[in-house]
Image (cartoon, rainbow, N blue to C red):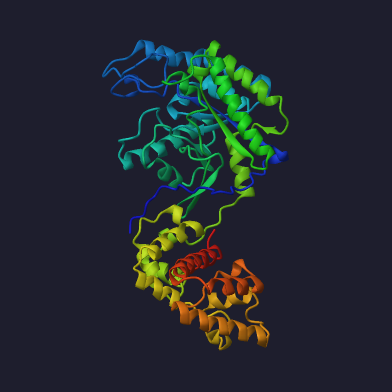
Amino acid sequence: MQRYPRDFRGHGQNPPDAAWPNGAKIAISLVLNYEEGGENNILHGDGQSEAFLSDIAGAAPWPNQRHWNMESLYDYGARAGFWRLHRLFTGLNIPVTIYGVATALARNPEQVAAMKSAGWEIASHGLKWVDHRDMPQAEERAQIAEAIRLHTEVVGTPPRGWYTGRCSLNTVDLTAETGQFDWISDTYDDDLPYWREVGARDQLVIPYTLEANDMRFATAPGYTDGEQFYTYLKDSFDTLYAEGEAGQAKMFSVGLHCRLIGRPGKIAGLKRFLDYARSHEAVWFPRRIEIAEHWAKTHPHQRFVRPSQMDRAGFVASFGSIFEHSPWIAERAFDLELGPAHDSALGLHNALARMFRSASPAERLAVLTAHPDLAGKLAAAKRLTAESTAEQSSAALDALTDAERDRFQSLNAAYTAKHGFPFIIAVRDHDKASILAAFETRIGHDTATEFATACAQVERIAELRLKALLP
């Protein structure tokens, strides 16, 4: 069965402790995109000129023509912008990660030598800086392989990280399938790294950014001067730094382009931000490969059987007893639009509870009557389900005095005679005394109220059972 693929849960309400080295409260990943010489150009075998991310307002591709103005803007990034940024980062001893388009790197050997000399990480930014949206899967796979080959030939070592940028729906899986990369960044969906399972491959993803990014100088709405860029970076830093001080350290990616931030009026804002960030204690400026190595060591991936990926038989076998003796609930839940959000205890509980809530009154009553009496005859005869046995034991209902047992049995008989179903309570939320107190209070309620209360308790019992099985 085809499942819903998008993951809205991520790390959930309580993300892992990043535990950055030396107690850092924030990890700032500076990324410099190197695309000059890899963009759309008929010189590069493309059918039109480039039209993306430049200072030409409203630029459009020129079919079958070179666009001299566009080319010169990209050339500025290589000729002047890169070196201005190189002086800035090496002067501050701040390492960066390069997203290097393979064909651009091949056309810029002096800049590559400078990147290597500075100790910067050179990751792959694809073979060409072009749109992959409509590219056939086989062609994109071939281009990824050629990008790795050419990058290795030009740089001297293979890339350990990847970011396409103008990607397709297939890009992340295709790059993961190579088994080549310690990290992939073609997502924008989190403030922390996470693992993505692609076949047998456990692929680390380090999310990137399109908002703390100088591309906003070339898009609308966007930044008009360096001060606006500085303000946005500072506000982002302050928020994330405060979260780090509160024990929730995050990652802050900053995206840069030679031909954009490399201009004098724009780089001034970046300089102010770097000075501001460096004025704080416990700030880490890692390359992305260092983030990847740290995360793989500190938070290695652990696979588990995901409910959304089970077949029907396995799903029902695993979760058919979550609602007491009522496997039909799991049967119906299997046919819902399950996805990654349902691979957690709370997520799967929602799916199962939906089926219970939408069932007929008679079906829900059957679920209630499937529950055993508390400390009743089935318990004494050790004929409870494993789940019920563990639950009643947790509240010491398997170690009652004779007087306590008599009291429970008397209440059970009176409650069932009045309401037509057994007294149900999530015993893991209580102790023996509070269970008895609730029993004595609820026995006086009208049956409609007790039916609703018992149904709510059935859902709570199911939730606690799932939390023992799933994250």
Q: Please say if 223 is above or below 381.
A: above
Q: Residue at x 39, y 13 (%)?
A: 56
In the image, taking residue 212 as reference, residue 46 lies left or right, namely left
Give the percent coordinates (x, y) of residue 98: 54, 29
Give the percent coordinates (x, y) of residue 452: 45, 66
- Residue 318 seen from this side: yes
Location of the C terminus by quadrant is bottom right
The answer to which quarter of the image holds residue 361 is: bottom left
- Residue 384 seen from this side: no
Q: Please say if 290 is above or below 354.
A: above
Foreground residue among 350 and 50: 350
Foreground residue among 49 and 158: 49
In the image, taking residue 110 as reference, residue 147 lies left or right, namely left
Residue at the far left in the pictured view: 64
Q: Residue at x 61, y 50 (%)?
A: 299
Give the percent coordinates (x, y) of residue 402: 66, 88
The mark tally for this picture is 0
Q: Please say if 327 is above or below 26.
A: below
Give the percent coordinates (x, y) of residue 280: 71, 28
Foreground residue among 264 and 140: 264
Location of the N terminus by quadrant is bottom left
